[in-house]
Image (cartoon, helix red, strand yellow):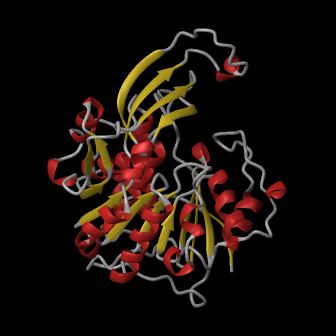
Amino acid sequence: MKERLEGGEQAETTHFLPFPFAYLLKLNSATYKATTSYSAGGVGRNIAEDLHKLDNHVTFISAFGSDQNGSFLRNTLPENAITASLISDTMATATCAIILDKSGDCKLHIGDMRIHQEITPELIYENAHLIEKTPLVCIDANLSCETIDAILLLACKYNKPVFYEPTDVFIADKPFQLNPKQYHQIKFMTPNMNELRKIAQTLKPSLSSSSLPLSSSTHESALKIDEIANLCGELRDVVENIVVTVGCDGIFMQRFRDAESGFFNSNLKYIDDDHGKGKLQLRHYPSMTIEKDVKSSSGAGDAFCAGFITAMLCGKSEAICVSVGFEAALTALRSVHAVPKEFFNKSHACWKTSAKFNIVRSE
């Protein structure tokens, strides 16, 4: 099986601050001591490398510069995984600076992502045969609306489910500015709270911005369960499987099937949810215990997606998919890089142990 990913990549410089980020609120041009590391990043690229290290076959469609950063990023994936990607002679490879506080919590991204505009609809159509053959198409929000539209059109044509990672609150609603026929091909999405609010506000303009405040808390320490339930409920007829990530508080899962049901059959065909037939449930999966040796949170969400997708394509139940996703995220949290050097194999206990959940709402 091969997953197709269309999305962003970037060379990342990560600065670890030995003190709370609150000290920097004045941004007064002073020099602050930090420990710096250099690594590969980008949501789409991270998920692609995570999937590869979890023993999946991946094709990654993106754009790299013909520079040192581009060469470095291309070497993080097998050569046959990037044959469909573009190498630009005119644009620099995307770069990003990340600020982490002493707890490893990601506080700020500053990036140059202009090369992502080179991932055009034409590049997608040239590789339509790859989408035709894949069981699952994954996209992030770094792509232009026009490119996302082209991907969704092809996914509709070949009846391929799309897994959408919203990436950032400012661009999370891109696919949902398109024709509903296209965005209904998105069968999975993994927003955090702020991204969920943004998407809901775009699709349901009656939800005023004043009623959807952006949270300043990365981990959503005070869970707004009622808000999550209401927003997911508003989107029940838009995306069949909504996974809301809430940091150290775990994830919320909304779908029309129970937690013991899978997502794909043995022929790698997506199992459509029975809208109006199955019982719509919102389930809260509290996260696993996080050890004190957290190095960085910057790649944990991408690793969760990769673990979840890996188990999903193996025909596992929702609860097992979440279990594998959580273990992948924990592995990433222990790494100073967004993608760990290695993960775990299918003999790990997470492949046999269903994640525990609480039912928040059942209709």
Q: Is residue 253 above or below residue 217?
A: below
Question: Considering depth in this image, is 147 or 132 the residue closer to the camera?
Answer: 147
The residue at 37%/45% (across/down) is: 46
The residue positioned 53% from the left and 41% from the top of the image is 289
The image quarter in which residue 178 lies: bottom right
Question: Compared to 220, does 227 lie above or below?
Answer: below
User: Horizontal placement of 326 versus 276: left or right?
Assistant: left
In the orientation shown, which residue stands out farthest toward the left? Answer: 80
Q: Position of residue 118 (x, y in %)?
A: 36, 51
Q: Position of residue 287 (x, y in %)?
A: 55, 48
Report if residue 324 is visible in the image: no
In this view of the protein, can residue 137 be seen by the observer?
yes
Q: Quadrant of the C terminus?
A: bottom right
Locate residue 90: give its quadrant: top left
Q: Nearer the viewer, residue 271 or 67?
A: 67
Q: Residue furthest front?
A: 90
Question: Which quarter of the figure is the N terminus placed in?
Answer: bottom left
> With 89 as the anchor, is 184 left or right in this view?
right
